[in-house]
Amino acid sequence: MKMNDVLLEVRDLCRYFDVGGGRTLKAVDGVSFTIRRGEILGMVGESGCGKTTLGRTVKLLYPKTSGEILFEGAPLDATDRKQKKAFAQKAQMIFQDPYSSLDPRMTVNEIIAEGMEIHGMRTPAGRRERVLELLEMVGLNREHANRFPHEFSGGQRQRIGIARALAVDPAFIVCDEPISALDVSIQAQVVNLFKSLRERLGLTYLFIAHDLSMVKYISDRVAVMYLGKIVEISDAKTLYQRPMHPYTEFLLSAIPIPNPRIEAGRPHIASGNEMPSPINLPPGCSFRPRCFYADASCEGCGMALSEVEDGHYSACRRAMKE
């Protein structure tokens, strides 16, 4: 990978929360990854693993505890208001809930045009025309511009949210569970919209989701997150065909196969215990209490990523021995 191909680089990023009583929640704990220009990096994991906190920290909505975030090769400083505003134009976010992420008091035109106005983009007439173009681009009608959010379905609201993100001509978009609140019949349409917009506009995505089938469909590479850490990262095809971390195996075994005979005959990997508390993590590998391969040596192992094959990284000592 050429360094000038890297749009976003995250180095040892941490985001901790003080939860009282001298206790600390390590929501994001030493995460590192890169995203190339035009790439879609999928981020998967169970609820509570830190995916959303990671996305919001990368977007500078949460202050980092430590580590570095570099965009286009330059480190981002959330305390620099001028830099933060410039980054807000280049990097947008699409939120999980299309019902709460749109201001109910504003028309669609006002919602989409707001970012352009904040960043001083286009004249009022130019902003209005751009709103109409964006509505068509995301599959809505120009007539929708004067309506309010409550007049739309969930899928339509999410399309409005996508149009709002596109309005300031970003290079990078954090998609935080953008389809999980939508009907299954609508999810594929929205994912296909993301893919077509990537091709049309040259966008780069961090696509956060828990639906592994959708992540496989849309992503170039996939990172698997567990209790604040990335435990495996690889190109999508390799990760789904040859997982190198037991947690990834566990997640993939839960994906149903739409063929009753194959589904009935394939093994399902059971996890023996519940996820540990992120406030009181076990020593060594945090997945050890749930792992079907764990032995005594895992208690002394950390969860640092190591390259087990070209471009394929795992945080499991078993994968390093194979």
Image: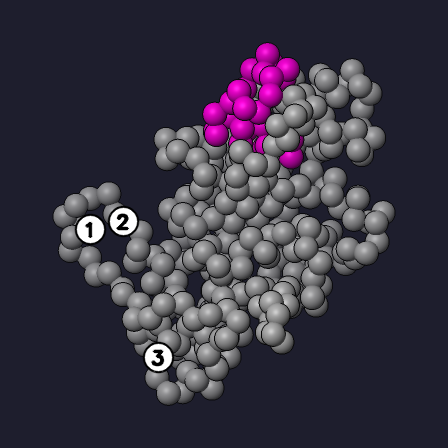
Magenta stretch holds residue 238: no
What is the CA distance from the residue labelled 2 to the residue labelled 1? 7 Å
**Furthest residue in direction top, as rendered:** 143
Q: Position of residue 20 (x, y in %)?
A: 62, 70
Residue 304 image offset from top left, x and y in percent: 53, 74
Residue at 20 percent across and 57 percent down: it is 266
> Between residues 64 and 17, which one lies in front from this camera angle?
17
For marks 1 and 3, give the CA distance: 27 Å
Horizontal and vertical percent position of residue 310: 49, 65
Q: Mark 1 = which residue?
A: 263
Check disc 3 and give the amino acid type: Ala
Task: Name the one closer to the observer, 270 or 274.
Answer: 274
Residue under the point 59% across and 57% down:
54
Q: Is mark 1 on a helix, strand or loop?
A: helix
Q: Callout 3: few (<14), some (14-19), or many (20+) C-alpha neighbours within 10 Å?
A: some
What amino acid is found at the position of numbered circle 1 in the picture? Glu
Please say if 115 is above or below 231. Answer: above
Q: Residues within 10 Å of mark 1 (few under 14, many from 20)?
A: few
Question: Marks 2 and 3, how far apart in space?
Answer: 26 Å
Residue under circle 3?
Answer: 294
Query: Does the residue at mark 2 contact the one at mark 1 (Cβ under 8 Å)?
Result: yes
Q: Which residue is drawn at 43% across and 50% down?
A: 210
Q: What stretch is highlighted in magenta?
A: 139-165
Residue at (53, 34) in percent of width and height? 98
Disc number placed over residue 138 in the picture, else none: none
Residue picked out by circle 2: 256
Quadrant location, the C terminus: bottom left
Q: Quadrant of residue 102?
A: top right
